[in-house]
Amino acid sequence: MQDFLFYLVSGLCIGSIFALVAVGYTLVYGIIKLVNFAHGEFYMVGAYASFGTYSLLPSSTSPWLAIPLMVLAGGTAGAAIAGLTERVAYKPIRRSGRLAALLTAIGVSFLLQNLFAFFSQARPLQYPTEPHGSVGEICQRTVLLGTDGLVLIRFAYIGAAVLFCALLWYLVLRTRFGRAMRAVSQDADAATLMGIDVDRVIRHTFLIGGGLAGVAGTLIALQGVTEPMMGFLPGLKAFVAAVLGGIGNIAGAVVGGLLLGVIESLAVWAGVPTGYKDVAAFVILILVLVIRPQGLLGRVTRVKV
Amino acid sequence: MLNITHLSVAYGPVRALTDVALHVAAGEIVTLLGANGAGKTSLLRAISGLTPATRGSIQLEGTELTRLPPAQIVRHGLAHCPEGRRIFPELTVAENLDLGAYCRPTDPAAKRANLACAFAYFPVLAERRQQKAGTLSGGEQQMLALGRALMSSPKLITLDEPSLGLAPRMVDLLFDIIRQINRAQRTTVLLVEQNANEALLHADRGYVLENGQITLSGTATELRGNPRVQAAYLGV
Ligand SMILES: Nc1ncnc2c1ncn2[C@@H]1O[C@H](COP(=O)(O)OP(=O)(O)OP(=O)(O)O)[C@@H](O)[C@H]1O
Ligand SMILES: [Mg+2]
């Protein structure tokens, strides 16, 4: 039973990361109906940027200053690469149909993976755990939960998810920009007629989504490794989470992410070998597509004539 | 107010409008009649910038619209009620109306006045303020589309078949209100209609569009008396 608590909490932690990435997925889909397969790479770029920031900081920097700075750098880099991708790759083909957009997204994903593999010479980076009190060491500290040690930094995942989802909720539902976003996602032409600069709304949506992915990548890399392929699986899983919650639906992406994290974790608890836990996500994807294609919180939209 | 010359619009090889000239004076209600596929919607979309003109000029009070980004055109005083209403179904009635004033963020007093005005014309919108717009009836959605257009204090409103799918009583009410808006607000109206009877009853002047070209124009009375219009559009 104590084990159960460990796996549950652990699932909620990783689910928070899925949620942060899934929210960006779903925002972009909601606005331009693009399944942005390069979204996981924004996460990877965020992790690299925070590692770079870490390397630039003098070694005497307090970790309590360094970590927020790294998260900030990761988020900024994620936003920047998302903005650049939108401008260079997606904007020119926005009217060319969904297949062209999907193929472009896959292309961007490969391109970013390979660019980073080339420049990092495919060497995974890890924060050194020496000396005591350094960023790497602090991020490996654990707390005993039942009989297992849970890495403390994982609680920051939950904190980050709560903070950013609350901010996003406020932005989308309570601000002028958020109203413009919702208008564009429902009817871009009609939004234009209201005087909304649709291109700008799309650009900013990418910036927000990429920023959240960059933050998520940074947080994961703090206690793991930074490597060019690190965004692939989380990207796919965030896509599953977004579909699970109802793609295009922000609350759905959060619920889907948390649920996916917990299901994966509890699958391991129930005896599924760790190596197979990733399969859980795709079993869920197939089940959702068969049983409830609109997702948990998605609605089937009706059009009045 | 609105001055269109030599306007052509094409979708790839499909020519929707050819060398169209049209003029609307301040304070007028002008109607544009035409069969399905004549190019009426294309004309209104060209004015609001949604569909780029391939040739020609569109001027609103002397400002050339064809060179402006569509989101800027609204700020020059044009409100376009598009074909099929195009309200935002997942937003509430209040949010839809609010978006109508999106282009005038710095004028809260005008926004309050316009909102009061929209509610005065369409009391049902006030009752349904917090309801999702997609749950309104077709007629109520058309009221919302018109109310939303009023929110930007437009000088010119273009309406694309507002009577489509409405019961005759609703059509009467709607045209009445369009006329009131024209009188009280001094708003100029360009009205696209298939319902030529009603349109010519309320308009000052009219144009007939056939296969992307203007083939007839005149005062509403002249057009009502024209045998070709009677045969083709009035069902006489
Ligand atoms: N997006 C488009 N792509 C290609 N052709 C188009 C497009 N939109 C309109 N057309 C063509 O342009 C012509 C004019 O269309 P338009 O919608 O302006 O007609 P309309 O007068 O509004 O017709 P209706 O009364 O049926 O609404 C038609 O032949 C139509 O097929
Ligand atoms: Mg039309």
Image (spheres, coloured by chain):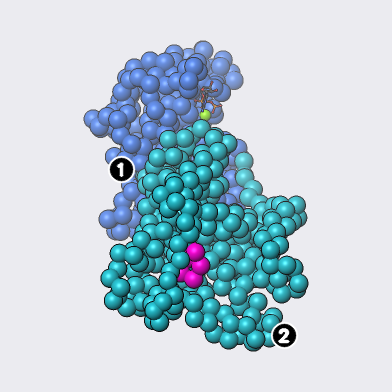
* Residue segment shown in magenta: A221-225
Q: Which chain is blue?
A: B
Looking at the image, residue B58 lies above or below residue A99: above
Q: Amino acid at mark 2?
A: Met
Disc 2, SS:
loop
Which residue lies at the image location 38% right of the left edge and 63% below the top edge?
Answer: A50
Instruction: Please say whether residue A17 is one of the residues in the magenta stretch.
Output: no
Q: Which chain is cyan?
A: A
The residue that label 1 is drawn on is B75
Disc 1, SS:
helix
Q: Left or right? Give the position of A252 relative to B176.
A: right
The disc label shown at residue A1, or none: 2
Q: Nearer the viewer, mark 2 or mark 1?
A: 2
Q: Amino acid at mark 1?
A: Arg
Which residue lies at the image location 23% right of the left edge and 30% below the top edge?
Answer: B62
Q: Main secondary structure of the magenta part?
A: helix
Q: Position of residue A96 (x, y in %)?
A: 51, 32
